[in-house]
Image: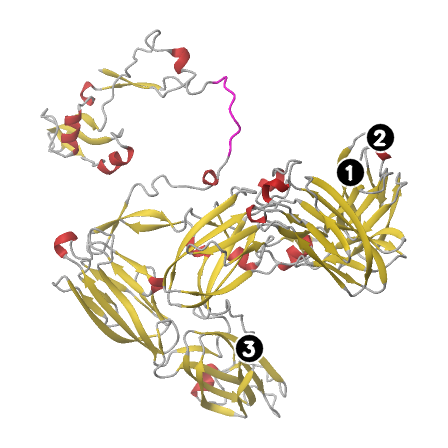
Amino acid sequence: MAITYYYPEGPLGPICDLATDDLDARDAEARRRRREGDGGDDDGRDVTYGPVDYGDMERVVDGPVAAIISRRCRIRTLSDGTKEYYDCVDDLLSPIGAPPSYPLLEPQYNWPVISTSPWGLDDNFEPLLLSPIDCSPFDADINIIPVKFFKANGTFVEKILTERSSPPTFAVRGGGTLQVKGQSLSARFILDGGSQLQASFKSDGTGISVTGSGTATITLDFEWDDQVNVSGRSVGSLTIAGQTFTQTSSSKGSITRSFSVTGGQEYLWTITGQAPTAGYRIKDGAIQWDDNAVNGFDKNSEMVITSLGSSGIPKLRVEGSGSSDGDIGLQLEWDDNPSDAGTALGTVTINGVSLTQTSGRRKGKTSATISVTPGVDYPINISGNPNGYTLAPYRMGFYDGDGDDLNAKLTITSSQPSETEFGQGAWSRDGNAYGVWVNPEVCTLPTLQQTVTYFIDIPETDTYTITGGADDVFQVFLNDSTTPIIGGVAGIFSEEHETYHTGSYTPPYAAQTTLNEGVLKMVVTCTNGATELTENGDPIGKSFQWFYNPGGWYIKICRGDACFEPAEVPWVHSGPDAGGDWGEFMDKYAAYPSNGNVLLDTDHSTAYNINVPYPGDYILEWGMDDDGSISLDGTVIVSSGYEPNSQTYTISNLSAGPHTIGVTIRNNGPSGDWVKNPGGIAWTLTAASGASSNALVSFDSNGNLVTNGDGTIEVSLSFEWDDNPSTAGTALGTVNWSGTGLEFTQGGSSSGSSSATATVNGNTTYNIQVFDGTGGFEVQNNGQKICFFDNDGDDCNAEVTIGATQGLSAIIASSLDFTPRASSNNLIWHTRKATGYKFTEI
């Protein structure tokens, strides 16, 4: 017997002692013979398991693997004729024996050194630093161990998991938030009896907007904390209404200026000397600037409206819908050295809740929540403030004895109605539908820029619209351009959420550009911000919790000059006519707000948003009961009285992309009986004869032929090959699509081509059948080409391409499209299509 030991290095020590048969120790040559299945040692045993080939795994780990490759047993026949296996031994891929330093005794085994190398139980470890890769799920076999996929003919291809983007991304949603149930709540500071003007920073960051009537004095407080020698100045010099705020070379500073304003006017500023990478945001009623907004937003300077108007009684005005009480969050923060000019504030009290500047503490902050009722003004009682205060809608500021800066600030931090529920989160519908991040909501990675590269199939050279947004900052680069086509702060948030938290709304970013047919390289950079920061500007606390600080981006690519997604139509099918007066077309396609209520002598209107797949002439077939009209993009093209059968109207040179079909119908009296007097309007839009495009036909990811549109479609396929069978076998024997009559066979020559045309039905999937395909296939060009590989698997040796198709009677839209068709939008790609991994043949 031999004793086998397993000794991991370090302080863990021996794990187990395992007694094994002496025959388990094999030299390398014996292992090789057994692996190759030649029977191994001639000891009278027969192989009952294996041999298993671990060649691929040995190449990956660069050496022998601890594994059983075969089992050999002696065999004897019992009296009843059955065979019994006994005295079995396992053949191991790697020999098992004692470690070189065995026995583990000093001085042969240096316990003091080995037990503390590379670490010991008394060591102090550095803080663990997470990187994006630590937050992502992984499969140990990704890009390493191939998986065999067997085909119908018994052969197989090997595939590995590969990233759909680099690095891979994951579908995410915009955190969580409390959503109002049927009511809203907000609060602001006012001077009761003073000026009723209101001022706010413009959402585009260019100045101040003043509403209300009359004239008053506005006071602005500008503060900065900005290392100008790193990324430049976050503002530089800002001039508004003759007043200039200049950010000096000092890393910190503040300036206060006042000027007269009038209701109904806007006051724009000019900025000079600002860093080219600077950006802004509106938050809590203030405008903030960052000297380098492309790497995640951190506040380097801020301007606040500290007062507006004349004297009055300070109050907290609570507004909102509904009658239920709610909660208002307040925070008092101070930086006040009492030995310089006294204290700025003692205590401020609102509705029985007090916030106090702690005596003896130069810096500090305290928070409180007060219960309030919409429609009530709550007096603000101030004590210990001999030097005055300023008031803005969301912030009050308090002066100490020097009177030239704000030493204490009271801020409204939140407003929450009592009746709430969990809602969709901070993001918009598109944000939640298409949003991605570099891990599945595990790590928020605040202030760390993420860079992801995509490769996207563009079906045809045309104009495309690229739309997107991010939480918080992003940029999108095409191919190797260093200029982003879209990018900025936000664009992913719901309007209600962003307006509530920042006072303004940033819509999604969009740009039109010409993209060439083929593969587009797209690079996205995105930086998630921080919701809480230390005094040094480092993220802490809720910044690392997805619920409070989600991060991510979304991108959509649409063909045409806008992304188009049709809406539902709230009508119903009103046919067939029980009285038998309508023809077949009206019976099949009539639509009306009701299929039982006559709704006499009323004009009923609705609109259908449609997507025209390709330019050309189209036939509008229509019918109506009684008087109605049909419009195209706002222009009436059909106006008629009662037409129980159908008529046609030719639309010439209709452009590809989104269009609107509007309909109006009036059912005349006198009968109010639906059976005697049904109502409805019917229409279909069909490609005219000769119109051609490949937009109606494509291959799905499995190679099946998929058609869109109703009616019949004429499709043409082209097949060609360039394949030397003596090099790596043939790429293809025969391929066909069931029920179409379309079939191609690779001939005996090394190259060739052929084509075929067939008439197929719309909205149908025709399954592919492949015979004698040695290397598998891949669908390319956005579903317009199938590439077949031979055994080397690195180039396209045979291919089938969709040529021009003709919609013989393909109805691309109709009056019964109450819910959008699957093919009725122009969205060709979005970020959710490139999440995770896919199997790729090798």
- Check disc 2: other Cα within 10 Å, few if <14, some if 14-19, many if 20+: few
Q: Is residue 240 magenta?
A: no
Q: Nearer the viewer, mark 1 or mark 3?
A: 1
Residue 282 disc label = none
- Check disc 1: other Cα within 10 Å, few if <14, some if 14-19, many if 20+: many
Q: Judging from the image, what secondary structure is the residue with disc 3 in?
A: strand
Q: Which residues are magenta?
A: 121-129
Residue 339 disc label = 2
First in residue order: circle 2 vs circle 3: 2
Q: Name the image quarter holding residue 734.
A: bottom left
The answer to whether mark 1 and mark 3 are in CB contact below 8 A is: no
Q: Is residue 20 visible?
A: yes
Q: Identify which amino acid the numbered label 2 is placed on.
A: Ser
Q: What residue would you read off at disc 3?
A: 607
Q: Is residue 581 visible?
A: no
Q: Judging from the image, what secondary structure is the residue with disc 1 in?
A: strand
Question: In screen coordinates, is 92 left or right of 804?
Answer: left
First in residue order: circle 1 vs circle 3: 1
Q: Position of residue 373 (x, y in %)?
A: 80, 53
Q: Nearer the viewer, mark 2 or mark 3?
A: 2
Question: In screen coordinates, is 502 left or right of 55?
Answer: right
Q: Main secondary structure of the magenta part?
A: loop
Q: Judging from the image, what secondary structure is the residue with disc 2 in?
A: helix
Cα distance between the residues tagged 1 and 3: 58 Å
Q: Identify which amino acid the numbered label 3 is placed on.
A: Ala
Q: Name the image quarter holding residue 211.
A: bottom right
First in residue order: circle 2 vs circle 1: 1
Q: Position of residue 90 (x, y in %)?
A: 20, 27
Cα distance between the residues tagged 2 and 1: 15 Å
Q: Nearer the viewer, mark 2 or mark 1?
A: 2
